Amino acid sequence: MGRQNGFNICGNTCQCQTGGPCWLAAFGAAAPDKTYSMKSVCFPALVVGAMLFGNLAQAQAVSGTMGVSASVGQSCSLSASPMAFGALTAGDTDIETTSVITLECSSNGTPTTVTLGNGDNVGTAPVRQMKSGINLIPYELYFGTTLATHDQVVAFDQAVGPTTSTFTVDITAKVTLPAGTPDGVYQDTILLKTTYTF
């Protein structure tokens, strides 16, 4: 009977003998009919794992930042409610209507005054004129509601304060319809101007 030797692979023994095949399970091959002297061989699981999975990509985590910003500009807008007399008829005298001029600022602006222009159809000061075709209707503007002054440059009603961003002033218009005024829609446009600081 031939000599037997064994080898160990991580606790599994393989016997080889003369006259019989020896399957080297660790290498997937058969040995010829010869006598072999084998030594114990053990591959640690860590080494085997490295050989099997060493080429697989590894997930990586990175971090960064994103900036968020905004800016608010300092500005003001000037507007006025419509100055509408409505329907006039012959003989109408001293018909009044009002408008509110409003200055709104994005932050606490400091306005000075507001200037009222002469309109599109300049008459003899302080008279302004509404126009329809070639026909005109004269009217007058007053600062406030007391008809006390025709000032072209008027002050706002609100005092400047640390939290004030809206300013208003009332303007009153008065008209007397001239005799024989033709029918039509009469209009005028007044330019408003103001200055302010922040």
Image (tube, grey):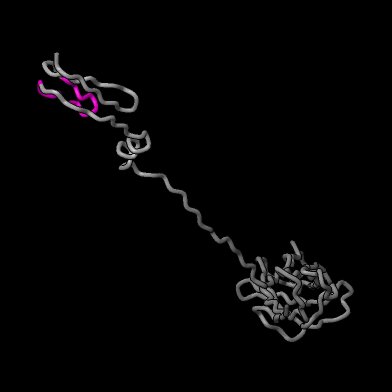
Q: Is residue 127 left or right of residue 23?
A: right
Specify whether 190 is left or right of 34: right
Q: Quadrant of the N terminus?
A: top left
Q: Is residue 131 magenta?
A: no
The structure residue drawn at horizontal position 47% and vertical position 52%, both measured from the top left corner, is 62
Q: Is residue 149 visible?
A: yes
Between 117 and 42, the one lying in front of the other is 42
Where residue 155 sits in the image (x, y, percent)?
81, 79
Note whether 154 is above or below 187 in the view shown. below
Would residue 172 be seen by someone viewing this image from the given angle?
A: no
Of residues 105 and 87, the one drawn nearer to the viewer in this rendering = 105
Q: Residue at x 76, y 78 (%)?
A: 111
Residue 122 in the image, given as x and y percentages of width and height: 68, 83
- What span is in magenta? 22-33
At 68% across and 78% down in the image, what residue appears? 119
What residue occupies the far bottom of the structure in this picture? 124
Q: Quadrant of the C terminus?
A: bottom right
Count of number-bearing discs: 0
Q: Is residue 44 above or below residue 175?
A: above
Q: Position of residue 169 (x, y in %)?
A: 81, 72
Q: Position of residue 3 (x, y in %)?
A: 17, 19
| Residue at 20% over, 19% down | 4
Which residue ends up furthest to the top in the rendered image? 1
Q: Is residue 58 left or right of residue 15?
A: right
Please determine whether, in this image, residue 18 is positioned above or below residue 84: above
Q: Nearer the viewer, residue 143 or 123?
A: 143
Residue 105: image quadrant is: bottom right
